Image: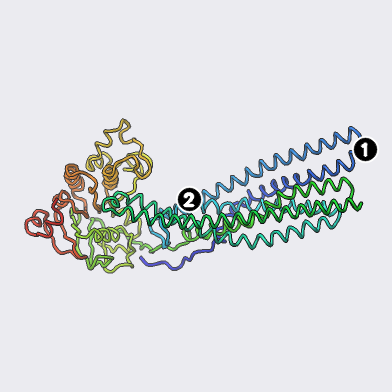
Amino acid sequence: MKTSDTERPRPGAAILRTALRRNIGAMIAGTVLMGLYQAAETAFPIALGLIVEHTMQDRSLGSLGVSIGSLAVIITTVSLSWRFGMRVLQKANTTEAHRWRVQVAACGLQPVARDVDLKSGEILTVATEDADQTADIIEVVPLLISSLVAIVVAAVALSLADLRLGLLVMVGTVAILSVLAVMSRRIGASTQEQQARVARAGAKVADLIIGLRPLHGFGGNHAAFGAYREVSTDAKRQAITVARVNGTYAGTALALNAALATAVSLTAGWLAFEGRITIGELVMAVGLAQFIMEPLKMFSEMPKYVMMARASAERMALVLNAPPVTTPGPERPEPGGTLEVDGVHHGTLKGVKFTVAAGEFVAIAAYQPRAAADLAAVLAVNAAPQTYGGVVRVGGREIGDLSIEAVRAHLLVNPYDGEIFAGTLRTNIDPSGSGREIADAVEASMLTDVVALHREGLDHVVRDRGANLSGGQRQRLSLARALAADTDVLVLHDPTTAVDAVTEQLVARNVAKLRRGRTTLVLTSSPALLDAADRVLVLDGGVITAEDTHRNLLAGDEAYCLAVAR
């Protein structure tokens, strides 16, 4: 596997262009309907002015009836165009946000990790808030255009009454947008920073939840809570800054819009007083001055939402366009199931070398827990082959030359903290629904008591992260899933740390029996699992220092006895 340097992160603008291009049809329909809505809204004060101008002069029931009918048509148009226009835009917005969420989630689920400097909690924020705010561009553009339609219609209508009124609206609108465009840049930058800090706080609390029990065990919870408090406070300060900037923006927009409406009303009153416009035109001008506040407000808010969408799209680009850590090779392992680690240097590992023959059950007793974690990371391809020295071979092939699909099908590394998903016991053990080995896996992992506890059996509902299960039950459920996969090579990392000694003995015996004839490597300090293994390798100081059966090592190696005896 080689590092890929052909892909580079695209700017957020490219993501926004993609969103706009995919929804061009919905946006055109929404723009037409929302433009019709704004035009009808603008027509209402114009119609009132015409009614005053003509109906009051004629004083006939026919003119009154026509006026009432015209107002009814305008009101109906306003109601229906808004209803269906927003329905079209919001459906497109929701659908587009879902598409981006799926894409971000797919990046996290790909077998080859991406080179992105974000934690899972931060990626979750990108997949939710940032996806939603990016998709908002689909509503922003039609609303921006429709607001412009209202302003143009109002300016034209006022220009027909008096050119100075129309020019006042156009010049005032340009001035307002110029001021707010400068302010919107600050909002975009502040929002991007806020989202990053909130994501970091979310990642920190996720880490706390996962590690709370061991933190309590050695008294590190207070320090961890203090670290979270610091990150959370930092996010809060940035949120206050963003709220302050947004408040300043909204207040400035409202003040400028009100000033423009006031200027139009006073100018129209002065022109009417001078006799240069009629009473009907005055009524229209005052009505438009009041009405124009709403489209002006909407129009002036759009730059802010554009900058927020741009900031969110930039964060999504970090995930979507990050290059893979490695480029998998094309080969597949040879049948047999041998596993060979040849001189691996990684983290605390300093030239680890051993071979597990096909069908053998081998245990590794790591005196330093970090060394076991580093070895598990290498075997699980969580550490890319080019990032460490030495070679790992699976089925006689170097792991760097294998396709990631072949590695995953041939070699399974089950971590000590395997994820438990919302669903049922059955779907957690057999996510693909193949039905293979479920009964044997449940029995071997001693999950039978959990199944027997519930009337639904294997269909008992499991909450996200196994919140309704104990630590030991979650661990056995994860072990059952690994055993049910029935891969050629299975690596288990501390599979029984949360179960009692009696259950541990039974699990060790059952796993050895179920995996007979299949290659199995267990990283553990459990005496029961060490005793069940064909042979035990001692990993100390980053290298293999001893090799024998568990009982022989107990009898002849004092350091081993102190490390594993309970």
Image quarter where the N terminus lies is bottom left
Q: Which is nearer the eye, 267 or 26?
A: 267
Q: Tell me if mark 1 has few (under 14), some (14-19) or many (20+) residues whose alpha carbon lies within 10 angstroms of its own.
A: few
Local SS, label 1: helix
Q: Position of residue 239 (x, y in %)?
A: 52, 55
Q: Determine whether, in the image, residue 518 is placed left or right of residue 311.
A: left
Mark 2 Cα-neighbour bin, 10 Å: few <14, some 14–19, many ≥20? some
Query: In x, y percent, where is residue 369?
Result: 24, 58
Looking at the rendered structure, the secondary structure element under dot 2 is helix
**Which three-letter amino acid code belongs to the residue tagged 1?**
Asp
- For this view, does 240 lie left or right of residue 455? right
Mark 2 residue type:
Val
**Closer to the camera, 230 or 421?**
230
The residue depicted at 36 percent of the width and 37 percent of the height is 461
The residue sitting at 49% across, 50% down in the picture is 128
Q: Which residue is mark 2?
A: 102
Circle on res. 58: 1
Where residue 480 is drawn, which disc sits there? none
Front-lying residue, 171 or 31: 171
Above/below status of 545 relative to 24: below
Query: Whole-percent x and y of residue 238?
Result: 51, 58
| Residue 170 placement (x, y as % from top left) | 77, 58
Residue 521 visible (yes or no)? no
